[in-house]
Amino acid sequence: MKAIVIRAFGPPEVMRYEDVPDPVPRFGEVRIRVHAATVNRVLDVALRAGTQMQRKPELPLILGVDCAGVVDAVGEGVTKFKVGDHVAAAGGMPLEPCAEDGAGYAGPQGMMGIRRPGGFAELVCVPAWKTVQLPKSLNFHEASVVMRHGPTAWNLLCNVARLKAGEWVLIMGASGNLGTVGIQIAKNVIGAKVIATAGSRGRADIGLACGADYAIDYGKQDLLAEVMKITGGKGVNVLYDNIANPEILPQAFHALGEDGRLVTAGAHGGPIVPIDFFHLYDKRITIKGMPGSDPADLPRCFEAAASGKIKVRIAHVLPLSRAAEAHRLMEGDQGMGKIVLDPAAE
């Protein structure tokens, strides 16, 4: 099979499009013929550059922390998937063989594409335990983006922040992938009132296009003043952030009202941000960092996408052989939307 392999960290040119042996599913694993894998700023691009060593990547490595495709082989002990099933997989998973439901597994774990072969390949083997069935009505490109961002956004808003219908939520980074998905979950699934914000008018307006009730360009508008005007001086109930911009997040933090909740799963714009502790204790604010997701939410995310409640934004779909170009686009200002690699598009 063809795969994107790195044997050293460095610029995009360290990625090699080459022939490697077809993987064979072990006990409890399925093999997926990949039709889509997303390119991610931190987990792929920064990792390849060598700035994510705390994740302990092991070389040589096939990149790609998610994938969507078709099951084309199953290992011993797998009964819940069959050849031809449409599936997706992502994130942390067992590194050693385990039962298809994960029962009793206590061995090492790590992310695909970091600690075990990833989705930048024609074929990848993953534990059945960490594989999810897809609605046939959802195409693979969309499914890969939902798999990467939907469960995280769902977990932050529904499980961690416990956002309720009718509450106000301020979504930072409104044009980013976690931002656009978060807006739609908050508005279309939960029924909250949504304020989207970004650093330019064009990016903020993407939030409106995704269903936000209001959009603020904090590059030209006073974020705190605008939020207070919109909410009648009460502030928002939930602040949703995954950037940790040290210049703007302190203003957003002051926009939290009584019993406000700040939730985050990222900090690539920071990570050090000053926090006004008087506002923290005076308003009884809670702050929760929660990367990852609840597996029980995965089917809900895909059902919401299949029904049109979540619509992902894809900027480019490129064949696998152009992975280096995809990384260069990501390193530059590639615009808004996700980049997807499709090994079947060669």
Image (cartoon, rainbow, N blue to C red):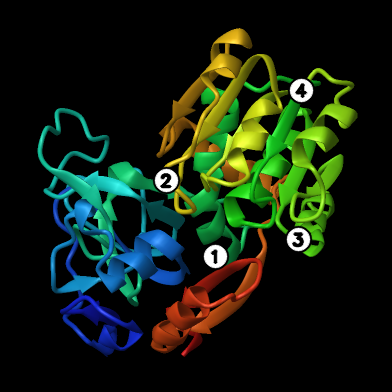
Query: Of the residues under marks 3 and 4, which one precedes in the sequence?
Result: 3
Residue 235, label in figure: 4
Between marks 2 and 4, how big is the CA–CA gap?
24 Å
- Residue with the mark numbered 3: 200
Query: Of the residues under marks 1 and 2, which one precedes in the sequence?
Result: 1
Q: Where is residue 5 in the image (x, y as percent from the top left)?
A: 24, 79
Query: Of the residues under marks 3 and 2, which one precedes in the sequence?
Result: 3
Residue at 66% x, 67% y is 336
The crowding category of the residue bearing disc 2, from other C-alpha atoms within 10 Å (few below 14, some 14 to 19, many at least 20), is: few
Considering the numbered disc 3 on the image, is that residue within a helix, a strand or a loop? loop
Whether tag 3 and tag 2 are in contact, CB under 8 A, the answer is: no
Q: Quadrant of residue 222?
A: top right
- Residue with the mark numbered 2: 271
Query: Of the residues under marks 1 and 4, which one precedes in the sequence?
Result: 1
Whether tag 1 and tag 4 are in contact, CB under 8 A, the answer is: no
Choose mark 1 or mark 2, whichever is in front.
2
Considering the numbered disc 4 on the image, is that residue within a helix, a strand or a loop? loop
Considering the numbered disc 2 on the image, is that residue within a helix, a strand or a loop? loop
Between marks 3 and 4, how big is the CA–CA gap?
22 Å
Between marks 1 and 2, how big is the CA–CA gap?
33 Å
When the figure is inspected, residue 229 is found, relative to residue 143, above or below; the finding is above
Q: Which of 59 and 302 is in front in this view?
A: 59
Considering the numbered disc 1 on the image, is that residue within a helix, a strand or a loop? helix
Choose mark 3 or mark 1, whichever is in front.
3
Q: What residue type is labelled 2?
A: Pro
